[in-house]
Amino acid sequence: MTNEQIIFSAAQQLAEAGAIKYTGKIYKARDAEGNEIQLKETEAIHTYNAWRALGFQVQRGQKAVAKLTIWKHATKTDKETGEEESKMFMKTAAFFSASQVEAMPA
């Protein structure tokens, strides 16, 4: 699974459990058998660093709504040869919902 699929699936489960909210929007998709289904859109969930990159700050005292194991990409440069080594590995990351963040001051 890709990170996008992992996060999407987790967000759907979190919304069904009441841990995060739905936005009120509904979109159409296809299931594994090709049948058309309707899905409710959930509020966004991102890591702390992703929210910061988007210009938001997690509110003080907020706890992650989920801890998900996602793929992480890392590159390492050999100092002697200058060659870059790239690897992918699984890492557990904390995710916060849109209702837990506020815009950072300009």
Image: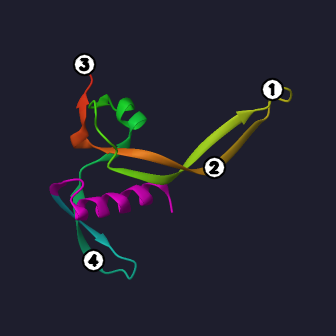
- Ranked by sequence position, the earlier of labels 4 and 1 is 4
- Ranked by sequence position, the earlier of labels 2 and 4 is 4
Residue at image point 23% right, 53% down: 20
Which residue is labeled 1 in the image? Answer: 79
Relative to 26, residue 3 above or below: above
Which residue is labeled 3 in the image? Answer: 105
Q: Which mark is residue 7?
A: none
Mark 3 or mark 4, whichever is nearer to me: 3
Q: Measure how far apart labels 3 and 4 are at the Cα level.
A: 43 Å
For label 2, the SS is strand
53, 100: nearer the viewer: 100
> Three-letter amino acid code at disc 3?
Pro
For label 4, the SS is strand
Mark 4 or mark 1, whichever is nearer to me: 1
For label 1, the SS is loop
Which residue is labeled 4 in the image? Answer: 36
Q: Measure how far apart labels 4 and 1 are at the Cα level.
A: 53 Å
Bounds of the magenta segment: 1-24
What is the magenta segment's predominant secondary structure? helix
Q: How packed is label 1: few (under 14 Cα within 10 Å), some, or many (20 or more)?
A: few
Left of 18 or right of it: where is 47? right
Q: Which mark is residue 88?
A: 2
Are the residues at dot 2 and dot 3 in contact (C-beta closer than 8 Å)?
no
> Three-letter amino acid code at disc 4?
Glu
Q: Residue furthest top?
A: 106
Q: Residue 70's x, y, as percent?
A: 50, 52
42, 16: nearer the viewer: 16
